[in-house]
Image (spheres, grey):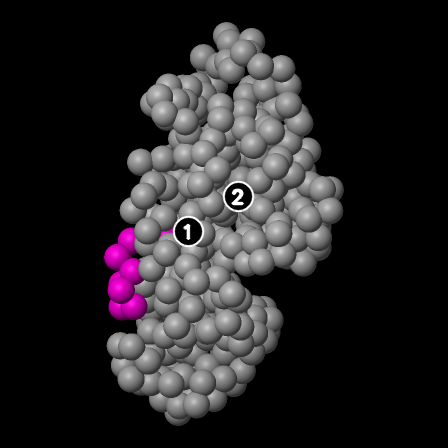
Amino acid sequence: MRFSSEIGEPAAGELVTGRVKWLLLLTLLLLPGLLPIFSNPLNAGTQTVRIGVLKFGTINWEMEVIQRHQLAEKAGIDLQIVRLGSTQALKVALQGGVVDAVVGDWLWAARQLEFKRDYYFYPYSTSAASLVVDPVSGIASFDQLAGRRIGVAGGPLNKSWVLYRAYARRVHNLDLASDATIKFAAPPMLNALLQQQELDAVINFWHYSAELNAAGMPTVLTMGELLQGVGVDQDVPLLGWLFSRRWGDEHADAINAFLAVSAAAKQLLLHSDREWEQLESMARIESEALKHALRDQYRAGIPAGFGRREQQAMGQLFAVLKEEGGADMVGKLAQLPEAIFWPSPVIAQ
């Protein structure tokens, strides 16, 4: 399959047949009794795909499902999983060609164009940071954050923090950076500080927020509600699969087959509670409330589609980040380049 160099779309006439091909593979992967009949469903030899993942990240749930059901093998992929210790290590491995794809930030991928590095992006999850409060604080709405102690995961240029600042300014006429006391820290520390009542609220990554929710601490604002408040009218993926343009163009069948495998694993996690019961990491969690919170929030973040509407919404989100964060946030980019979007038909609309 060939792709346009301008917006990365299939050549004329290929989109429909390409989509049918990959939707067929996705369907077969979800019918384990049927797929073994097909020795090679895509009429292609086994292709190696090396995936970099965080050693203790939630992405390992998906990898475990893929391995348990041998989804990669059934799709003709030799899947090699490389587990690394940090997001920085993932980026280095991707840039150095040690792995073919990682889950990462689309803004990072877009900014690499400044350095003549071309990467494709394809959605992995719409889950993102939420604002969770200590009920003892008495905070029931966002406009009650003035004068409060707020913990934020990451640093001042964390994308979620910049978006929360934009929401506060646009919707509530608040400058969180000056109207509240802000503490930047690692996600586990933020949760501990909130539970020790040393913070009133935290803006933390979704799985850490789920931990707080399970402990009885309510969410006051989700990322979906925030996006609506700043004028982005569509849920957008904040994380996605990243891979180099050259590798993607040269291995289109391999990456599309892997994306179909990834989508099939997500569908199993979306519809089957038994899949969650079989996850090794879940077996080590004693709290049923936490298990259910993690499951439900993961499911809520599974992308339902990725077409022009989602891509335009990402452009709207980029404009918010540019206005609020300036060049420190978006570099020299005037707008989000459409060239980063990989046109896989697996979940296209």
Residue 90: x and y in percent read 67, 51
Which residue is nearer to you in this view: 236 or 61?
236
| Vertical position of residue 279 compared to residue 13: above or below | below
Residue drawn at the location 33% of the way across and 48% of the way down: 310
Circle 1 Cα neighbour tier, 10 Å, few/some/many (<14 / 14–19 / ≥20):
many
Left or right relative to 47: residue 160? left
First to last magenta residue range: 228-236
Q: Is 224 placed left or right of 85 in the picture?
A: left
Q: Amino acid at mark 2?
A: Tyr
Using the rendered view, name the quadrant where residue 134 is placed: bottom left
* Residue pointed to by mark 1: 237
Amino acid type, callout 1 = Pro
Say whether residue 346 is left or right of residue 76.
left
The residue that appears at 54% across and 11% down in the rendered structure is: 43
Q: Position of residue 188 (x, y in %)?
A: 58, 69
Between the residue at mark 2 and the residue at mark 1, the CA separation in whole angstroms equals: 14 Å
Nearest the viewer among 54 and 246 is 246
Callout 2: SS:
strand
Q: Is residue 7 magenta?
A: no
Query: Which of labels 2 and 1 is toward the front?
Result: 2
Compared to residue 148, the image places residue 80 above or below, namely above
Q: Residues within 10 Å of mark 2 (few under 14, many from 20)?
A: many
Residue 10 visible in the current orientation: yes
Q: Is residue 203 visible from the viewing direction of this image?
A: no
Relative to 170, does residue 106 appear above or below in the rendering? above
Q: From the image, which quarter does the C terminus lie in?
A: top left
User: Mark 2 sits on what residue?
Assistant: 120
Residue 289: image location, x then y, percent: 43, 57
